[in-house]
Image: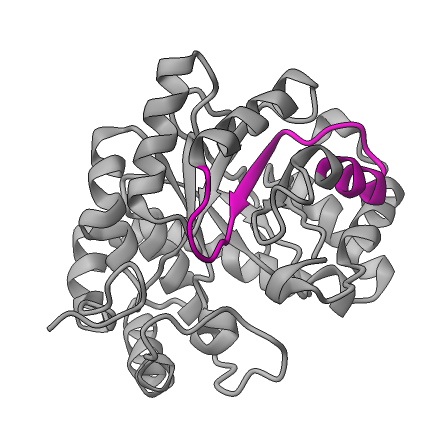
């Protein structure tokens, strides 16, 4: 059954934009479908009020993939007939080669590849070793001043660096990050619900953008993904695969699909402003949209109670090591 309503919106953190609770990602997405299907998917997302697209240029660090997914998205969104003011665009700024590759250079390249003049927001993320947080905040502010985007968030930052970024931005009169894009879902909860980011979420200093909800498709029933998927923090992927039958059983008990269960769980977190997922078929989007009705039908308390046993990374620290 097709979704007939409109996806609700939530604020993406203090000072952040109002966004639909669902957003479509680009990693291994637009380059895995027929072009006409991509155009139809973009139109359908707009039709239901979920025209929020996370689109990155995968060109450095572990994502030096020479991917064309951003180029394809740019062509598809133009073919869809949507004007630039009819959808939200979230870009990525990578830290692996920063500051040698500047944010200004990254934004110019990314926007040129998509074929637009600006993004609405960006995620700054993924680094190894120490970074100069004050320089990052300053350089992000310069891109905001240049009109390339309006708001920003962080992805996979150490919590002390996030706190420093927020404090320095406020002290300097610059724009602080308003959200954190984190792995969060039925089986991975520690980063979002533990003390690492949990305190910032509870205080309202940041909103949560949940990603990798389905563990690269495993929690949607694809137990042996053939494509590249996200990092296995804490080395728990075998346990996640083993837990899938229980996920399916719980979903069946609620009259829902495993993907609807996973998305409803994430939306039940009070800090969640937005859930980022990749879909490569229209029926996948329709199935995901059904999570909204499931959450309304089941309720937060029953959903949390039924899925408590699925929290598999309780002992994983923010750096991926195990607590003793």
Residue occupying the point 67% across, 58% down: 60
Residue 110 highlighted magenta (yes or no):
yes
The answer to whether one can see residue 279 in this image is: no
Region in magenta: 107-132
Residue occupying the point 28% across, 51% down: 192
| Horizontal side of residue 237 vs 300, given as left or right | right
| Horizontal side of residue 3 vs 159, given as left or right | right
Residue 113 highlighted magenta (yes or no):
yes
Q: Nearer the viewer, residue 60 or 272?
A: 60
Vertical order, 237 against 118 (above or below): below
Residue occupying the point 67% across, 48% down: 55
Vertical order, 302 against 109 (above or below): below
| Horizontal side of residue 287 vs 78, given as left or right | left
Residue occupying the point 20% across, 39% down: 199
**Color style of the picture:** one colour
Vertical order, 268 against 214 (above or below): above
The answer to whether one can see residue 265 in this image is: yes
Task: Specify the quadrant of the image occupied by residue 252.
Answer: bottom left
- Give coordinates of residue 179: x percent, y percent: 42, 36
Q: Nearer the viewer, residue 244 or 27?
A: 27
- Give coordinates of residue 89: x percent, y percent: 66, 37
| Horizontal side of residue 53 vs 300, given as left or right | right
- Give coordinates of residue 314: x percent, y percent: 19, 67
Task: Specify the quadrant of the image occupied by residue 234.
Answer: bottom left
Q: Nearer the viewer, residue 124 or 128?
A: 128
> What number of labels is visible?
0
Screen quadrant of the N terminus: bottom right
- Give coordinates of residue 213: x percent, y percent: 43, 62
């Amino acid at each position: 059954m097709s979704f007939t309503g409109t996806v609700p919106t939530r604020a993406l953190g203090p000072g952040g934009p109002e966004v639909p609770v669902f957003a479509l990602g680009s990693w291994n997405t637009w380059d895995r479908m027929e072009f006409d299907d991509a155009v139809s998917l973009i139109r359908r997302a707009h039709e239901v009020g979920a025209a929020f697209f996370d689109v990155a240029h995968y060109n450095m660090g572990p994502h030096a993939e020479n991917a064309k997914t951003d180029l394809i998205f740019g062509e598809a969104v133009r073919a869809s007939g949507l004007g630039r003011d009819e959808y939200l665009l979230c870009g990525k700024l990578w830290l692996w080669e920063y500051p040698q590759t500047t944010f200004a250079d990254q934004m110019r390249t990314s926007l040129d590849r998509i074929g637009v003049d600006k993004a609405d927001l960006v995620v700054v993320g993924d680094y190894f070793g120490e970074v100069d947080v004050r320089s990052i905040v300053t350089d992000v502010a310069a891109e905001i001043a240049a009109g390339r985007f309006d708001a920003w968030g962080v992805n996979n930052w150490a919590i002390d660096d996030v706190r420093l970024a927020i404090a320095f931005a406020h002290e300097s009169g610059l724009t602080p990050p308003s959200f954190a894009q984190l792995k969060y879902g039925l089986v991975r909860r520690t980063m979002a619900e533990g003390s690492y980011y949990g305190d910032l979420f509870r205080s309202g200093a940041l909103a949560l953008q949940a990603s990798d909800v389905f563990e690269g498709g495993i929690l949607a029933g694809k137990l042996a993904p053939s494509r590249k998927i996200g990092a296995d923090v804490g080395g728990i992927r075998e346990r996640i695969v083993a837990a899938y039958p229980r996920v399916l059983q719980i979903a069946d008990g609620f009259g829902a699909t495993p993907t609807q269960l996973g998305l409803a769980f994430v939306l039940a977190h009070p800090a969640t402003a937005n859930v980022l997922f990749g879909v490569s078929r229209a029926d996948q989007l329709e199935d995901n949209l059904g999570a909204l009705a499931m959450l309304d039908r089941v309720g937060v308390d029953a959903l949390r109670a039924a899925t408590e046993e699925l929290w598999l990374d309780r002992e994983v620290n923010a750096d991926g090591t195990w607590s003793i």
